Image: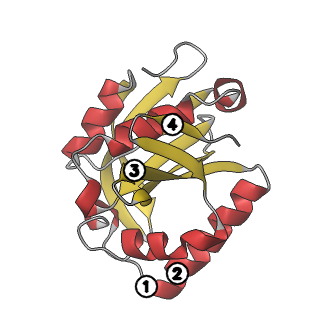
Amino acid sequence: MLTARDGDVRIRPVGRGDADLYLALRGDAATMRDLGGPQPPDRIRAGHAREVAETAAGRADIVVAEVATADGWVAAGNVSLVAHPPAGAEVGWLVLPEHRGRGVARSAVRLLLGLPGTAERWGVVEAQPSVGNTASNRLCAALGSTDRGEVDVEFAGQRFRCRRWELDLRAQVPQ
């Protein structure tokens, strides 16, 4: 997987050294509000290790979004692109609270979906943000995704009402 940059945001493959980012993201109540609340540290560490292995094996494209600061590049969140039948893949993202509202997720998602070979590999990409997650639903619309309506989704043993968005990467390049 390649790295990519768009102004003050860049992406790189997730690695073993990103465990603290995962703990900060998935252990934060505000970040995980629409995903059932913060996860316990052991579960976060196991999920991180699994995502590093899946990315290294080429079974998923999971990246860390970094932002440029006066002190250099700082991890701000992550974006995952994983197999999800019947669509080709599901895309999801999390951004640390201090970096929200600055376009980090939008830039990182666009960078990941625009990497060479992504459209051919994954084809149709789906996102399923909670119906109450206005920012994520706006991002899906801004990507040019098609709103397929509301669905019930199970995550972490809980059911959530989500909006299902679909984007055929073969038909368009995210802007």
On residue 40, the disc is 1
Residue appearing at x 33%, y 55% in the figure: 70
Q: Which marked residue is nearer to the observer: mark 3 or mark 2?
A: 3
In-image side of 100 versus 173 (left or right): left
Q: Which residue is mark 4?
A: 5
Secondary structure state at the residue bearing disc 1: loop
The percent coordinates of residue 158 (x first, y second) are: 38, 68
Quarter occupied by residue 97: bottom left
| Residue at mark 4 to residue at mark 2: CA–CA distance | 31 Å
Screen quadrant of the C terminus: top left
Label 4: how many Cα within 10 Å (few below 14, some 14–19, many 20+): some
Give how far apart the Cα atoms at labels 3 and 4 are.
10 Å
Mark 1 or 3 closer to N-term?
Answer: 1
Front-most of residues 150 and 36: 36
Q: Marks 1/3: CA distance? A: 27 Å
Q: Quadrant of residue 4?
A: top right
Q: Give the labeled residue for mark 3.
A: 67
Which amino acid, by three-letter code, is at mark 3?
A: Val
CB-based contact (under 8 Å), mark 1 and mark 4: no
N-term mark: 3 or 2: 2
| Contact? badges 1 and 3 (CB < 8 Å) | no
Mark positioned earlier in the residue sequence (3 or 4):
4
Reading the image, the residue beneath label 2 is 43
Viewer-side label of 1, 3: 3
Dot 1 or dot 4: first in sequence order is: 4
